[in-house]
Amino acid sequence: MNDKLLLLGDEAVALGAIHAGLSGVYAYPGTPSTEITEYIQGHPLAAERNIHRQWSSNEKTAMEAALGMSYMGKRAIVCMKHVGMNVAADAFVNSAMTGTNGGLIVIAADDPSMHSSQNEQDSRFYGKFAMIPVLEPSSQQEAYDMMKYAFDLSERYKEPVLMRLVTRMAHSRAVVATGEVREPNPMSYPSNPGDWVLMPAVARKRNEQLIALQADFLTEAENSAFNKFIEGKDHSVGVIACGIAYNYLMEHFKGGCPFPVVKLSQYPLPVSLIRRLASECDTLLVLEDGQPVVEEMIRGVLDNGKTVKGRLTGDVPRTGELTPDNIVSALGLKDEEVFPPSELVVPRPPALCQGCGHRDMYAALNEVVREYENSRVFSDIGCYTLGFLPPYRAIHSVVDMGASITMAKGAADAGQFPSVAVIGDSTFTHSGMTGLLDAVNEKSNITIIISDNLTTGMTGGQDSAGTGRLEQICQGIGVEPEHIRVVVPLPKNMEEMKQIIREEIEYRGVSVIIPRRECIQTARRHNKQKKQ
Amino acid sequence: MHTDIILSGVGGQGILSIATIIGSAAINEGLYIKQAEVHGMSQRGGDVQSNLRISSEPIASDLIPLGKADIIISLEPMEALRYLPYLNKGGWLITNTAPFINIPNYPDQDKLMKEIKNLQSVAIDVDTIAKQVASPRAANIVLLGAASPFLGIDVAKIEDGIRRVFGRKGEDVVDMNLKAFRAGLEYANNSIKK
């Protein structure tokens, strides 16, 4: 079954996983990783093989469920955006300590330049932290091919493998030639059942074993077909090009790069290739998307060896994604003479859709909080983050998934009133529920608005884990039933909404207001489906 | 052959369906293709763009370098100018003339059109033409038609691409889009002659 398909990087990863004998994908939506899971959800072979493909509540539950599937001998992947790694970190780092049974690949999609994120953290650090192999594809074809390789690597060493994507790999299309389609693994219990109980005595033994594997992981990286030493005639510079940085380098040298190059797509750092490059070249240039991970490793603290140029030296910009343009001067090339930017063009920031329920919620909230001298509204990750921009300018913080409720609590602890949290339904079930329990236990004086659009809106309308059960969840956690208020956010209900918000701010305890109306994007899609 | 294309517009206008048709034609011709898209937050009424590269030789970067785009295809006039530094000095700007005004400080429209006309450009009111010959929904296909002389792919092959992409939706939809495509092509041919 050798096809040629035009695929996004995310889709190439997804198809590669299916063809490598995947039994389950576990994920929480997050740009730019969402399309991996969506592609598997839509693929006929996934349905035929009954591959697990439902969304998880958050990245940690996804990571743990995937580890459970691996325990049973089957192949699993976990997909998330880079900041999802922070949520999954406890399970992720300890999955290297338990080890795996069936192949387990963790796919983290980084977002340098923060097209759709709150930071530029580089997931390669997580791979090093957990002491496991990391793969970083430079093309969609490599992304596809790497999945089989990564499952095999994982099953050979009984350790998880981290695959790192960046936005321009995840969200760019190219033609991919597909290969052999493997069967999933049969069920089998681990041959080393005691290793999975990480009490200190076991963990100490496992730690020794994991450290002993580091030499093997290094050998694998040094011999990997994804890492290449490419000869060049001009030895004034040796270039280390990580992941897609290799493409930006080669864009400038259609006939071949004059400098020797180490094309780097598998970690730990292949030390022998780097040493050879250093011994043959006068200086080194590191091109890597994200943070200066490789550059720091090569320079070290003493930095008394070869001149190493990169993001730390400013030869490549310290922040932001790489482009073919911002590596030009580091390569000693001249900038093209181009049209100057038009002076007429002004920014066009994203905005909440016309008719969106979050708009009505913010309109009502703004009017009520204006009645108080000093109100603070702590918000969260989702479409409603756009409430920071005009015309609403309604919120004072956005930090991480779920932080609205706990920050409002902490502020109330410090004496803030009114202390309001605004969170979406999917973000609430992702990481807001445990914070709500803290607030209930202390009867904190906060007002929580769960703006419920019945979906995970920002990433394109995926299922939301608590749909239809938010009142029950809040009641179960201990919010008093009379302070769980539901309203339909529409302009005609403005007075009712304002009255409810006013009453619940005045209530000295935890109250939850749920403005509930379907996301207009998913509503439009559902109406279309009904007509057909 | 090698054509680097920047597609631009406002989130929701449908630049990606233009890319899909060009991509389909390119693949059918056995050409290499890379297409970088923007998903996520910026799709909510913000500016969006896609880099589409097609070539008979392998393509390195997913992103088009500054000054290397052969053509900018825009569904919105101000968005057409946003990526101007990426257009090569001999490149063409193909843009819809109807503004999408969802910001308070939208620039003066006469100045905007003047700047566009000072460039090597085809400026076309795709919404009006789509309404006249086909359906308002086919506005982006009118624009594709207007861009088709500059793509480096045979016009007939792009029409085949339209047939493949819309084939599932039935003969009527295919015909409507072919009409829209040809109206855009005709407008561009007349405009170039002038």
Image: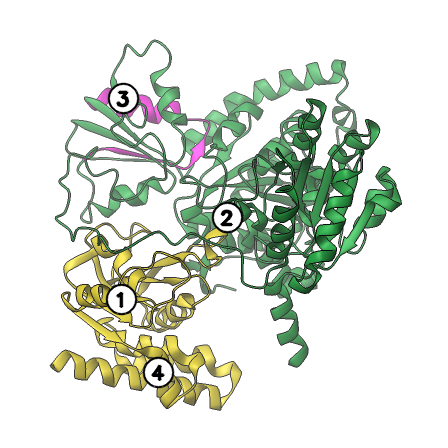
Amino acid marked by disc 1: Gln
Write down the chain letter for disc 3. A
Taking the image as shown, residue A486 lies to the left or right of residue A248, namely: right
Element on which disc 4 rests: helix
Write down the chain letter for disc 4. B
- First in sequence: mark 1 vs mark 4: 1
Image quarter where the C terminus of chain A lies is: bottom right
Q: Which mark is residue A308?
A: 3
Q: Which mark is residue B109?
A: 1
The crowd level at tag 4 (other Cα within 10 Å; few <14, some 14-19, many 20+) is some
Q: Nearer the viewer, residue A96 or B154?
A: B154
Give residue A410's quadrant in the image. Answer: top right
Q: Nearer the viewer, mark 1 or mark 4?
A: 1
- First to last magenta residue range: A259-281
Q: Nearer the viewer, mark 1 or mark 3?
A: 1
Residue drawn at (65%, 52%) of the image: A364
Q: Nearer the viewer, residue A357 or A476?
A: A357
Q: Which residue is mark 4?
A: B128
Q: CA distance from mark 3 to mark 4?
A: 58 Å
- Same subunit, labels 1 and 4: the answer reads yes
The crowd level at tag 2 (other Cα within 10 Å; few <14, some 14-19, many 20+) is many
